[in-house]
């Protein structure tokens, strides 16, 4: 089911930031070299949070399945509603057992009805362990996918859309039967196809080419820029989101893997089928500032470990470029 895409065919795009016009050709060549061992399409968007220096854009205007990186705009939407007074961080939210979606966190721990979790703890679970149940509970709480996309548009970001919850996305990917709770739908799907889970790390053309729940690397990076420069949320909500993302536990083999020990990274990962992603903000040493990074891989049949290695190597190339080579 693999869809081999020769990396030589990738369009390596270098466009300048609004202020700086120096194209980062050296780091682009290094990214192209790193990605040669991966089938599929690699997309990268990176620039300094303070706007200094050029942007690095590689296939950055293509749409990529976000997978769990879509939890970043959900978190932003939730916190915007906290800022407006519609929601409170300590507000307890009942978790419907029928909304339990397999993943680390709530579904793994709670087997019986009677669970209520605060908004703040749901955000923590969603971003640090990528809890799908917490995600869907929060998305429903704010008003659904359309409300999340509307918030993204209110930030001036057009290349990112949210169309489903995680349960709906997973149902569509695996072709699970409709009309059942997610746990029952998954059980029925596995019963009908015991090898269903073998699809989990394989590209699927129908899914890969679906415009739903996709983002360009540029759009994701623009959203991160809005959040981390304090233009999207209140100072308190901005700091909370940053602190939670710095506690992420799912990205050890990706952006952080080849950075110097102790490097602070506020991040979110995403994985499904042929897609392996990592987005976030890297704190550079000394007074070098912060670096926005969005790295997406789609349509790849290589083992997840190989795709993660590409993300780690690309992140290190970007780290070194902005620290030592990029013009100010």
Image (cartoon, rainbow, N blue to C red):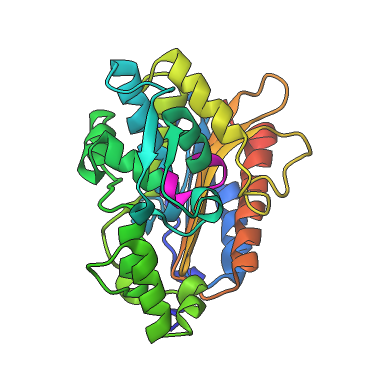
Q: Judge by depth and name the residue closer to the eye, 177 or 49.
A: 177
Work out whether 274 lies above or below 82.
Answer: below
Q: Quadrant of the N terminus?
A: bottom left
Q: In the orientation shown, which residue stands out farthest toward the right?
A: 261
Work out whether 135 lies above or below 186.
Answer: above
**Residue 61: horizontal and vertical position, in percent?**
34, 51
**Residue 147: horizontal and vertical position, in percent?**
22, 37
Q: Judge by depth and name the residue closer to the eye, 151 or 41.
A: 151
Residue 32 is left or right of residue 100, and the answer is: right
User: Which residue is found at the position 48% from the left and 84% from the top?
Assistant: 195
Assess whether residue 133 is covered by the magenta stretch.
Answer: yes
User: Which residue is found at the position 42% from the left and 57% from the top?
Assistant: 101
Q: How many marks?
A: 0
Residue 194 in sight here: yes
User: Which residue is found at the position 34% from the left and 70% from the top?
Assistant: 185
Question: Residue 302 appears in which quarter of the rendering?
Answer: bottom right
Residue 280 is left or right of residue 3, and the answer is: right
Q: Quadrant of the C terminus?
A: top right
Residue 6 in sight here: no
**Residue 66: horizontal and vertical position, in percent?**
40, 53
**Residue 259: horizontal and vertical position, in percent?**
72, 43
Residue stretch in magenta? 127-134
User: Which residue is found at the position 51% from the left and 44% from the top?
Assistant: 279
Q: Predominant secondary structure in magenta? A: helix
Work out whether 253 lies above or below 15.
Answer: below
Assess whether residue 57 is covered by the magenta stretch.
Answer: no
């Amino acid at each position: 089911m693999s869809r081999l895409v020769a990396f030589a065919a990738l369009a390596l795009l270098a466009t300048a930031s609004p202020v700086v016009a120096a194209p980062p050709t050296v780091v682009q060549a290094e990214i192209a070299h790193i990605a040669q061992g991966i089938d599929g399409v690699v997309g990268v968007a990176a620039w300094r949070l303070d706007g200094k220096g050029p942007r690095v854009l590689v296939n950055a205007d293509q749409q990529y399945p976000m997978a769990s990186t879509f939890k970043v705009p959900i978190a932003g939407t939730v916190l915007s509603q906290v800022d407006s007074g519609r929601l409170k961080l300590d507000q307890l939210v009942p978790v419907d057992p029928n909304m339990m979606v397999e993943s680390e966190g709530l579904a793994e721990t709670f087997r019986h009805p009677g669970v209520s979790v605060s908004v703040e703890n749901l955000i923590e679970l969603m971003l640090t362990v990528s809890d799908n149940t917490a995600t869907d509970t929060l998305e429903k709480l704010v008003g659904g996918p359309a409300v999340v996309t509307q918030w993204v548009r209110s930030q001036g970001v057009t290349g990112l859309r949210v169309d489903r919850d995680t349960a709906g996305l997973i149902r569509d990917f695996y072709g699970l039967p409709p009309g059942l709770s997610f746990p029952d739908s998954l059980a029925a799907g596995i019963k009908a196809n015991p090898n269903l889970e073998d699809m989990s790390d394989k590209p699927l053309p129908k899914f890969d080419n679906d415009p739903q729940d996709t983002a360009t690397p540029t759009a994701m990076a623009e959203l991160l820029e809005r959040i981390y420069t304090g233009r999207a949320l209140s100072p308190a909500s901005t700091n909370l989101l940053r602190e939670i993302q710095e506690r992420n536990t799912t990205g050890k083999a990706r952006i952080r893997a080849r950075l110097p020990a102790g490097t602070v990274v506020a991040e979110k990962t995403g994985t499904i089928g042929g897609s392996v992603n990592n987005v976030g903000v890297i704190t550079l040493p000394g007074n070098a500032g912060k670096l926005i990074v969005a790295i997406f891989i789609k349509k790849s049949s290589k083992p997840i470990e190989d795709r993660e290695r590409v993300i780690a190597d690309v992140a290190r190339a970007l780290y070194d470029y902005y620290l030592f080579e990029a013009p100010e």
